[in-house]
Image: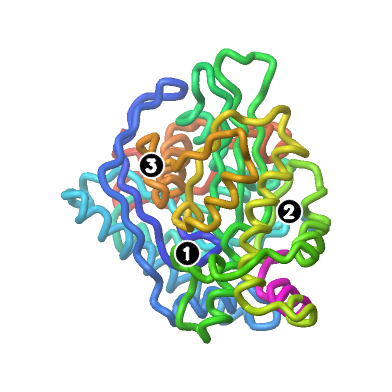
Amino acid sequence: MSGTSADGVDVAVVEIEGAPPALQWRLLHHATLPHPPDLRAAILAATRPETSAVDDLCTLNVSLGERFAQAALAGIEAAGLAPTQVHLVGSHGQTVWHAPESRPPATLQLGEAAVIAERTGIAVVSNFRARDMAVGGQGAPLVAYVDVLLLTHPEEIRAAQNIGGIGNVTFLPAANRSDLSPLAFDTGPGNVLLDYSAAHITGGRLTYDRDGALAAQGQVDNDLLVWLLDHPYFARRPPKSTGRELFGDAFARQVWQRGQDQGLVAADIMATLTALTAQSIARAYHSFLPCLPEVVIASGGGAYNPTLMRMLADALRPARLLPAAALGIPDDAKEALAFAILAYETWHGRPGNLPAATGARHPVILGQVTPAATNIFTHE
């Protein structure tokens, strides 16, 4: 998994058996491999129309395939396995553009699956989002299907809140509540504006607000926060998804210009953007969930930001905020684990989308399969 923050590859090696709802899984190894600075710069350039070009996209697609293959092989070795012992690679790819509201709806993830299959000798499932969009869905959030499988509680109403570059929530009714149904959507910016701001403040020395230290030095400006929360995305009803197309560098620059025009210092702008992530999540719950959850399970890079977690815990009270690690899922492994499970479902010919989350007209088998060098059906 390489997400909106484009800071590295999350790798999970997972042993999976059975079928939903009795799916059994065991996480054997997980790690994050940071992208080299030049690769991250190329990814970020590719997400901006003013700095992308078709030849660069073509080259980046292959470069990312090589990078993902290296990451898969490193994860396999660290798990104490040989590539011949691994049946399948699930690769989300790197999103460079996601436009579910365009006509026609479109999305583009890079990371050539043929390269991954050749370098690893393992069959690859990739391009998960396109099939959901082909039947009227947003193509996101796809992790919702896995959240329902892994995190539903017999009696407790939960929400699974991922905070990567973009935030997404899955509402998880208790198993004993037949009157409620799962729901999922993107809540808005997660870390994407914070990452830009950390680099802006430090002249590129930092690529994210480590330990929330920059935001902790500032004060939230209510006027700027109110203006930010007035963004039309937050009022749009689900199903909905978003990305750098709305909340990328251009928007971040606009926020910084407005904050400076108000006379705010850098730390106050950072604190206010951190509050935006927390408050947009809380407002989404109040506006769009059928009822408020009792427990919120946080994952993704944002779960490592204590300033953000404090703001979010305050905004979500009386719900309890727990890290995914408290339930046995490391925060930075959850989405890679999810795409391993989605690849497994595709391999077995089962749908992997949740129409209540994406808005698709019906469930579909996700992704495209790139065979290994041997017969595609060698492994069962």
Q: Is residue 52 above or below residue 332?
A: below
- Left or right: residue 322 versus residue 278 is left
- What residue is rendered at 64% in x and 83% in y? 51
Q: Residues within 10 Å of mark 1 (few under 14, many from 20)?
A: many
Residue 380 is situated, as x and y percent measured from the top left of the image, at 31, 33
Of the image marks 1 and 3, the number of the one nearer the N terminus = 1
Task: Determine whether the residue tagged by mark 3 lies in a helix, strand or loop.
Answer: helix
Quarter holding the N terminus? Answer: bottom left
Pair 3/2: label in front: 3
Residue 29 is situated, as x and y percent measured from the top left of the image, at 27, 48
Of the image marks 2 and 1, the number of the one nearer the N terminus = 2
Residue on which the image places disc 1: 111
**Magenta: predominant secondary structure element?**
helix
Q: Residues within 10 Å of mark 3 (few under 14, many from 20)?
A: some
Q: Residue 16 lies in magenta, yes or no? A: no
Task: Please name the amino acid that badge 1 sits on.
Answer: Gly
Of the image marks 3 and 2, the number of the one nearer the N terminus = 2
The residue segment tinted magenta is 245-258
Q: Is residue 106 above or below residue 289?
A: below
- Mark number, residue 100: 2
Spatial separation of the CA atoms under disc 2 and disc 1: 20 Å
- What residue is rendered at 64% in x and 14% in y? 178
